Image (cartoon, rainbow, N blue to C red):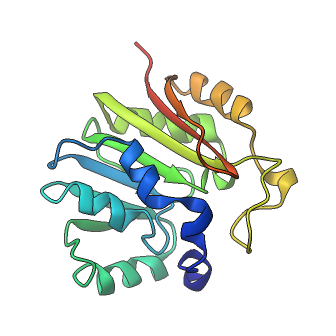
Amino acid sequence: MIAVFEDADRDQWQLPDQVVRALSLNDKRAVVADIGAGSGYFTRRLAAEVPEGRVYAVDVDGEFEDYLLEHREEWGTPNIEPHLAIYDDPMLPGAALDVVFTANTYAYIRNRVDYFGKVHAALKPQGRLVIIEFRPDGTPPGDIAPAPQHRVSRDAALEELSRAGFTLAHEETFLPHQWFLILQPSP
């Protein structure tokens, strides 16, 4: 599984450096969570942007926790904190996060309205939720994406996230196979 996430060709279509730049993480002490962190593909890039902050690498699989602990020093990102969660709760501290980021995970989350309600509670009042997910019509290479019939459309996600207490703040359109939403807690 780690090999799939760390495939060298992934940078060609996932554009991770451009994604992280689009987040404008200007506060070097920010607290970020990467839900579905896996091998830390985005986690380590996020951690490099907030060297005085903390990045919770949230996942339900302990194999990834071990991998992150083993590699965070060599990546120069000791501010990565593996965070084991459960399927229906990210287990994040309340009102503590500046950004919650998730890529390629949204379609796998059950009871998304309830789950993202818990994410809402974990964000600071001015916090942001960032979601990147495969479009139903996207054609990414390799085995990383769920089958098209299991993917969630941008519009369906926005409807669910609205019910979880979020509004769309901004949308990026440069990813070839995915939608990329930046949301904020609704007033």
Residue 86 location (% of width, % of height): 50, 60
Q: Is residue 16 above or below residue 173?
A: below
* Residue at the extreme top: 187
Q: Quadrant of the N terminus?
A: bottom right
Residue 103 location (% of width, % of height): 54, 54
**Whether residue 91 can be seen here:** no
| Closer to us: 10 or 149 | 10
Residue at image point 34% right, 42% down: 99
Residue at image point 74% right, 74% down: 143
| Closer to us: 45 or 90 | 45
Residue 148 location (% of width, % of height): 84, 54
**Whether residue 140 can be seen here:** yes
Report which quarter residue 48 is drawn in: bottom left
Q: How many marks?
A: 0
Q: Is residue 1 left or right of residue 75?
A: right
Q: Quadrant of the C terminus?
A: top left
Q: Is residue 129 above or below residue 79?
A: above
* Residue at the extreme right: 149
| Closer to us: 180 or 97 | 180
| Closer to us: 80 or 89 | 80
Residue at image point 48% right, 82% down: 63
Residue 153 location (% of width, % of height): 75, 38
Q: Is residue 79 left or right of residue 137?
A: left
Q: Is residue 123 above or below residue 145?
A: above
